[in-house]
Image: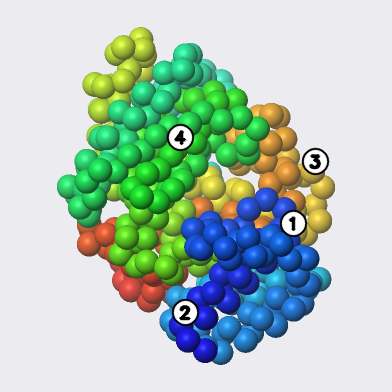
Amino acid sequence: MTERQWQRDYAMLALRIDRLITGTALIYRGPAQWRAAVAAEPPAAPGALAEEAERLLESAPSAYLRAHVRAMRAVARRLAGERLPLAEYGRRCLGLEPRRVPEEVFEQAHAELDAALPRTPGPLADRLRAWRAAHTLRDVGRLPELVGRAVAEARARTSKAIVPLPEGEVVGCALVTGVAFHGAGDYEGGLRSTIHINKEIPFNLADLLYLVTHEGHPGHIAESMLKELRLGPEQGVRFMVSPSFVLSEGLGLLAEELVFPGDEAQEWLNANVFPELGIRPDGSDFAAVHRARNVLWGVWGNAAFLADEGRGEAELGAYLRRWALYDDGEVAAVLGLLAPSPMSPYIFGYFHGWELVRRWVTGPDRARRLLTEQLLPADVTSQDHTGAGL
């Protein structure tokens, strides 16, 4: 089999599995005729797709692609009725074994939030909501302009501190409704991208750079653009329940810290955004809040384990209120995302990816490698000698 034929069969396998999954499991920028061909077929039998993955494994041209075929094989087997413990299923998909995070880690994050938020009375969850409300953008129509301003700054810092970015890149902002996400960065090719933001969720301006760096630069858009420019066709098929997305989401959560170290994000917002909107400094520490929130992604993973064990919505809701500090509306939005499904392992990419990447990225060269090379969690783990803890 030629490498071109292998790449076509690989893409067709990913497209056929994606068709069987509720939602989206694939970022696809390969040939349009391949997508059209799969759309014209009857839906494939999951067992046959698992067998096709086995065949492709025998001739995979790289360790990177072999790891992604293993992930697709695991998902196809799940669709065919195989039911593994979530940790084992996650290991087969992600290339690392998800684990429960001790609640002591969340207690430490709560303590950091307590110190980072304004010293107001009331429970920690109420104080966090009040802090968000104090920084909420009242005129959502201003958001595209503010996002554009933040993109320009984050892009300039990424190009200077990590890796040169191509001239002529255009990043737009679209306000959307009826979606499950808060924000999503979409690289469309040809140096054009869009950051989509859910305008049905109040926008916390203290998170402006946190979101823009995650979805844009040096996060998802920068990674997709640079890898497509440098690596070519292999980046046209990106199966999302896979090892590469562990590192992508880890990089996204670390992105603000990489280009706005210390309190530089807060300083930039205080100088360039808040004065014209009448937002005054309140003594809070944005960087510490964001770091604590990164830790609290582990709550979602623990809740996913509980859901996989068959725990009821009442127990899951109580867990999310206690440790993620969610209110009833936030709990209702999350419960559907935690229901066991072929996509369940994806949620582990956030906390575990962030934990892995933050230990490994000890300077700009390693950040550049995450943006430009096809790395796997095993590559990062094998080179992690920092011994850093949470």
**Label at residue 340:** 1
The residue that label 4 is drawn on is 113
Of callouts 4 and 1, the N-terminal one: 4
Of callouts 1 and 3, the N-terminal one: 3
Amino acid under disc 1: Pro
Q: CA distance from mark 4 to mark 3?
A: 26 Å
Of callouts 4 and 3, the N-terminal one: 4
Q: CA distance from mark 1 to mark 2?
A: 36 Å
Q: Residues within 10 Å of mark 3 (few under 14, many from 20)?
A: few
Residue 355: quarter of image: bottom left
Instruction: Identify which residue is drawn at 33% across, 17% down.
Output: 274
Numbered disc in front, either 2 or 3: 2
Amino acid under disc 4: Leu
Query: In the rendered view, does 51 fall on the left or right side of 194?
Result: right
Amino acid under disc 3: Ala
Residue 326 makes an appearance in the image: yes
Q: CA distance from mark 2 to mark 4?
A: 51 Å
Amino acid under disc 2: Arg
Q: Secondary structure at mark 1?
A: loop
Which residue is outermost to the top?
278
The residue that label 3 is drawn on is 314
Query: In the rendered view, does 292 fall on the left or right side of 33?
Result: left
The residue that label 2 is drawn on is 4
Quick check: marks 4 and 3 in contact, CB under 8 Å? no
Numbered disc in front, either 2 or 4: 2
Q: How many marks?
A: 4
- Counting from the top left corner in percent of width and height, residue 228 is at 37, 60
Which residue is outermost to the left?
160
